[in-house]
């Protein structure tokens, strides 16, 4: 049985992953930023305080990390971009994420992000990781898209 493993993210991982991202991730990145997923992955790796790559069967199937909120030092913005192959090991990945989020909550009181309303795989992942769904933000950026805010607050806060 092949299981997933997580390593420190690299530029080589960005280049490999960008070629095979799930269409919903490509769409969400474009609708939220107007940029390509490859460009956003490059910036995410550079800006992240913590960035990891997810490997399954000797290939990169995802990357995730956290960047500082631009105006609130107690808040981090986690991100995840992946291929559809992450679905083959999603239960293992969610278990790994729980531990990672515990580490991130040492760095940040609050973790928050927005996700396109149609990106149900991301919503499911966030809910499994303990994020709560919040407000909808309509008419965001490209094509007046609707995004949903997700938030997770450290338990001792």
Image (tube, rainbow, N blue to C red):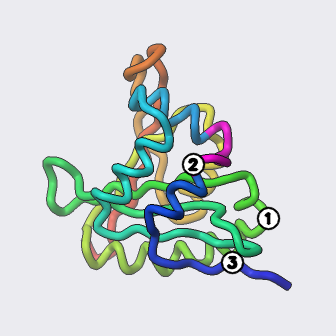
Between 96 and 50, the one lying in front of the other is 50
Is residue 24 shown above or below 18?
Answer: above
Between 91 and 8, the one lying in front of the other is 8
| Residue topped by disc 1 | 88
Q: Earlier in the sequence, mark 2 or mark 3?
A: 3
Q: Give the residue drawn at x 25%, y 67%.
A: 109
Extreme bottom residue here? 1
Q: Give the residue drawn at x 35%, y 73%.
A: 104
Q: Earlier in the sequence, mark 1 or mark 2?
A: 2
Residue 114 in the image, given as x and y percentages of width and height: 42, 41
Question: What range is drawn magenta here?
Answer: 18-24
Residue 20 in the image, given as x and y percentages of width and height: 67, 48
The answer to whether marks 1 and 2 mark residues whose Cβ atoms lie closer than 8 Å is no
Label at residue 111: none
Is residue 4 shown above or below 133?
Answer: below
Give the crowd class for mark 2: few <14, some 14-19, many >=20 residues within 10 Å: many
| Residue topped by disc 3 | 4
Secondary structure state at the residue bearing disc 1: helix
Between 52 and 94, the one lying in front of the other is 52
Secondary structure state at the residue bearing disc 2: helix
| Residue topped by disc 2 | 18
Q: Earlier in the sequence, mark 1 or mark 3?
A: 3
The alpha-carbon separation of the residues under discs 1 and 3 comes to 10 Å
Name the front one of labels 1 and 2.
2
Name the front one of labels 2 and 3.
2
Magenta stretch containing residue 102, yes or no? no
């Amino acid at each position: 049985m092949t299981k997933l493993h997580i390593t420190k993210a690299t530029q080589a991982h960005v280049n490999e992953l960008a070629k095979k991202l799930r269409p919903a991730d490509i769409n969400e990145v474009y609708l939220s930023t107007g940029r390509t997923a490859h460009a956003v992955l490059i910036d995410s790796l550079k800006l992240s305080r913590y960035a990891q790559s997810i490997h399954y069967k000797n290939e990169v199937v995802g990357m995730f990390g956290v960047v500082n909120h631009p105006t609130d030092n107690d808040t981090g913005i986690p991100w995840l971009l992946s291929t559809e192959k992450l679905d083959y090991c999603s239960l293992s990945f969610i278990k790994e994420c729980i531990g990672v989020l515990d580490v991130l909550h040492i760095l940040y009181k609050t973790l928050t992000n927005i996700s396109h309303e149609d990106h149900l795989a991301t919503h499911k992942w966030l809910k499994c990781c303990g994020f709560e769904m919040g407000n909808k933000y309509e008419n965001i950026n490209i094509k007046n898209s609707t995004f949903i805010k997700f938030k997770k607050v450290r338990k001792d806060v």
